[in-house]
Amino acid sequence: MIALDQLVFRWPRQQAPCLDIPHFEIAAGERVFLHGPSGGGKSTLLALLGGVALPTAGTVTLLGQRIDTLSGSARDRFRADHIGFIFQQFNLLPWLPALDNVLLPCTFSAQRAARAGDARAAAAQLLGHLDLAPDLWPRPAAELSVGQQQRVAAARALIGRPGIILADEPTSALDAPRQQRFVDLLLAETRAAGAALLFVSHDDRLAAHFDRTVALAEINRATHEVSA
């Protein structure tokens, strides 16, 4: 599902790379916990995997497609079709109802819409599985609690069964019991969808839930710390 080979990323005007990863793979359906300190390059790595940033050298292959060779518009289409992203700050549209926020990927991707089938029914099913009560679905996202917004963001990432889910510190705003509950729900839903999951966090307490735990420092030959 994910393969990095001789990946190097260097910020403009910096001599030393912040990422230098000889090789890293995630298999289909595998759920991987990637950890490291804040400022260590975890979010930068997710930006490369999502096609938001391009490597200085090396290759990024997702689902058999080298995304580092695609044009910007082609990377945008690939991301919309095949990648579900859960952002640390959720990035919901605050004025849009919870259910409509979940439906957004199906608006931008015909493939996601086709895989979802009845998109509204699929969105409702995901929200139900993620324990968001139906009376909250019509509410604007801005009126939801942090935990409720988090579940909406997870449902949005999962709708249309993307092959890859990338989660960037999605539990950082939650207390420990809610963190554990959310991770359990997310793992159950990614398992049901057959998606590969890369869950990035600095909180090692969550690692036991995953198939594999990887320290970024173990795969990254660069030692220069960055602010991403």
Image (cartoon, grey):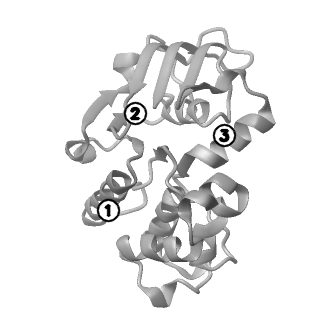
Residue receiving disc 2: 37
Residue lying at the far left of the rendered structure: 208
Q: Position of residue 68 (x, y in %)?
A: 67, 23
Q: Position of residue 91 (x, y in %)?
A: 62, 59
- Label number found at residue 23: none
Q: Is residue 99 above or below residue 33?
A: below
* Residue drawn where x is 60% and y is 10% of the image: 16
Tags 3 and 2 touching, CB below 8 Å: no
Residue receiving disc 3: 78
Observer-nearest residue: 226 or 211?
Answer: 211
Q: CA distance from mark 1 to mark 2?
A: 25 Å
Local SS, label 2 = loop
Residue receiving disc 1: 185
**Left or right of 30 in this view: 51:** right
Local SS, label 1 = helix
Q: Is residue 63 above or below residue 193?
A: above
- Within 10 Å of disc 3 (Cα), the crowding (few <14, some 14-19, many 20+) is some
Tags 3 and 1 touching, CB below 8 Å: no
Question: Three-letter amino acid code at disc 1?
Answer: Leu
Question: Three-letter amino acid code at disc 3?
Answer: Phe
Q: CA distance from mark 3 to mark 2?
A: 30 Å
Figure quadrant of residue 105: bottom right
Mark 3 or mark 2: whose residue is earlier in sequence = 2
* Residue drawn where x is 63% and y is 75% of the image: 100
Local SS, label 3 = helix
